[in-house]
Amino acid sequence: MALIPNSDEARDIAYHFHAYTDARDHEASAPLIIDRAEGAYVYDSNGKRYLEGMAGLWSVAVGFGEKRLVDAAARQMQRLSFGHNFTSRTHMPAIDLAEKLVKIAPVPMSKVFFTNSGSEANDTVIKMIWYRSNALGQPQRKKIIARERAYHGVTLASGSLTAFSHNHASFDMPIANVLRTGSPHFWRDAEAGETEEDFATRRANELEQLILSEGPDSIAAFFGEPVLGAGGVVTPPRTYWEKIQAVLGKYDVLLVADEVVCGFGRTGKMFGSETYDIKPDIMVLSKALSSSYLPISAILVNDKVYQTIADESHRIGTFGHGFTGGAHPVAAAVALENIAVIEDRDLVGNAARVGQYLRDRLHRFSDHPLVGEVRGVGLVAAVELHRKNFPSAAAFKDGQLGSQANAYLAEEGVLLRAAVDALTICPPLTITTEDADLLVEKIGLVLDRMA
Ligand code: PLP
């Protein structure tokens, strides 16, 4: 590939070390430079328009260029461009946002701790859980259970909960005290003849066996996304969460709902925990919290968690954890305005309505020779590409179906992502039925092109 010397593409390759990228491949191909965006559409540096079918990275809930957020950021930047919350200092955006989150939480929550990313939030949660176990005089209670296909971030601890080998290989991860249990991927993991309910029972039994074999008094918490996002939009089979929660309750294991993808309307209700009647002790929010206009994440803890930690911090003299940019006033002001936009425009209702419309239409691909399953809830969905039904599939390795489909979709002006071979779909909550039609039309074109 010959790039024009000193072009933007060449300078990107020269200077920019990319996230989640094969560095050598990057050096050998032209990067896609996204220049501007509006609503559900982004434009590259050549002016080509794409439907942003992943809302950036599962995050731009209110769409791009929302003036209310831009104005909220500018107002706050002028009034108080930085403020922190160390040693009892505070500011209005942090107070207002913490109160708002406690008020809209689907279960009683006590306090909100602010961080900057989903990874940082989950790392912080692990530290809070260990701190609590020590405070309870149970220093052996440190093991944390996460699931196959889970994605909880990439920092040392949160990344150890994440289930993917490329997040661990050569990083000397996972860290100790992380246990793994099966994912709720019914289509992929169910045994012949198993119903969704049977499969959910099996997963709950496996969880109980894991807890018993490790020793219940060594298990501190279970982390779960209500719907596994990066793991391929894996919606739980019927009765799954009810059965999992029964096991956790039996052994007094804390439940952490990682709502980084599901929060703020994605599943057709404000929180995934509402959609699936999950009663977490801790909730983790990010991404759609600010529509990713600025980085911010939030941890909601209930009284059971908070009170023990508060007592311990008093004994030690401080809760020795926090980030310079945690509770950043500009990010918090943007998050508050973002939640107001979601509420004022009933974007949760729109996600439910347009999501249903989109999924109804995606289901027409269920019988396509290249498709294993279409699944989803609210406005998040996956088309699982499946090579067994695909005559020339031998040409592709696992994972290549998804990346090939994505490359063709980008040519068609649609940006999606692939979780192995599941094409994941997670557009802004603002999309219209016309946008949904465009998405479906282009996916259909690409499936036919590949079959
Ligand atoms: N948790 C979930 C469910 C996620 O999907 C992600 C990111 O995709 C994270 C945590 C990590 O968030 P971040 O990339 O902001 O660190």
Image: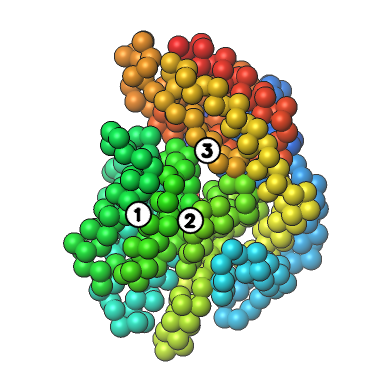
Q: Residue 202 vs residue 366: left or right?
A: left
Pick whichever, 135 or 248, lies toward us: 248
In the rendered image of this protein, does residue 216 appear above or below residue 386? below
* Residue 262 percent coordinates (x, y): 55, 50
Query: Pointer 1: what residue?
Result: 146
Spatial CA span between label 1 and label 3 = 21 Å
Q: Amino acid at mark 1?
A: Ala
When the figure is inspected, residue 413 is found, relative to residue 283, above or below; the finding is above
Label 2 with label 3: CB-CB less than 8 Å: no
**Contact (CB < 8 A) between labels 1 and 3?**
no
Q: Of the residues shown, which amino acid type is indicated by label 2? A: Asp
Q: Residues within 10 Å of mark 1 (few under 14, many from 20)?
A: many
- Sequence-wise, which precedes: disc 2 or disc 3? 2
Read off the residue under disc 3: 376
Question: Which residue: 74% across, 54% down?
Answer: 343
Q: Position of residue 261 (x, y in %)?
A: 54, 48
> Taking 108 as reference, is 235 left or right?
left
Question: Is label 3 in a helix, a strand or a loop?
Answer: strand
Q: Secondary structure at mark 1?
A: strand
Mark seen at residue 258: 2
Q: Is mark 2 within 8 Å of ligand 1?
A: yes
The foreground one among 421 and 46 is 421
**Residue 328 position within the rendered picture, expressed as x and y whole percent measured from the top left:** 64, 63
Question: Label 3: how many residues lie within 10 Å, few (<14), some (14-19) or many (20+)?
Answer: many
Question: Mark 2 or 3, which is nearer the eye?
Answer: 3
Real-space CA distance between mark 2 and mark 3, rounded to the nearest whole angstrom:
18 Å
> Which marked residue is nearer to the observer: mark 1 or mark 3?
3
